[in-house]
Amino acid sequence: MGGDLKLYRLTPSAEPNDPRWDNAPGHGEILVRALSPADARIVAAQAEIDFLDIGAKPGDGTTTDFASAFRDDKLYHVVLESDDPGEGPRGVISRK
């Protein structure tokens, strides 16, 4: 699987005053090592704190992964940064 990884940069595409930011806070730019642009969104979303990770419960067994700003193509766009992912596993590399 490591040979299929690439570097992707997710950058905000919506204006700062876009009402969609009210539902999902922005996280600036994020660089991830992932399999595809869609996988890059999943990797970025998985790096966010989820209710299940901190003991706060919106409902038993309910996750908030689907609500991530990174999954909204109106808030973030994904750009291929490099075909060479460097060394390391699938995951977040840096945030700005």
Image (spheres, rainbow, N blue to C red):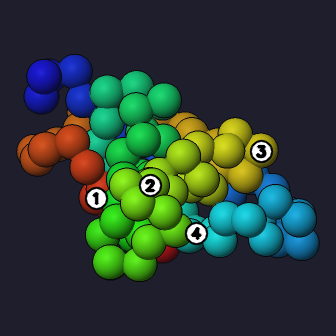
Identify the mark nearer the N-term, 2 or 3: 2
* Label 2: element kind: loop
Identify the mark nearer the N-term, 3 or 1: 3
Name the residue located 50 percent from the left edge and 57 percent from the top edge: 64
Q: Residues within 10 Å of mark 4 (few under 14, many from 20)?
A: few
* Alpha carbon separation for disc pair 1 and 2: 24 Å
Whether pointer 1 and pointer 2 mark residues with C-beta atoms closer than 8 Å, the reply is: no
Q: Residues within 10 Å of mark 2 (few under 14, many from 20)?
A: some
Identify the mark nearer the N-term, 1 or 2: 2
Name the mark nearer the viewer: 1 or 2.
2
Q: Position of residue 66 (x, y in %)?
A: 54, 46
Q: Position of residue 4 (x, y in %)?
A: 22, 21
Identify the mark nearer the N-term, 2 or 4: 4
Report which residue position mark 4 lands on. Answer: 28
Name the residue located 68 percent from the left edge and 58 percent from the top edge: 12
* Label 4: element kind: loop
* Label 1: element kind: strand
* Alpha carbon separation for disc pair 2 and 3: 22 Å
Tag 1: amino acid: Ile
| Label drawn at residue 74 | 3
Tag 4: amino acid: Gly
Report which residue position mark 1 lands on. Answer: 93
Q: How many marks?
A: 4
Report which residue position mark 2 lands on. Answer: 63
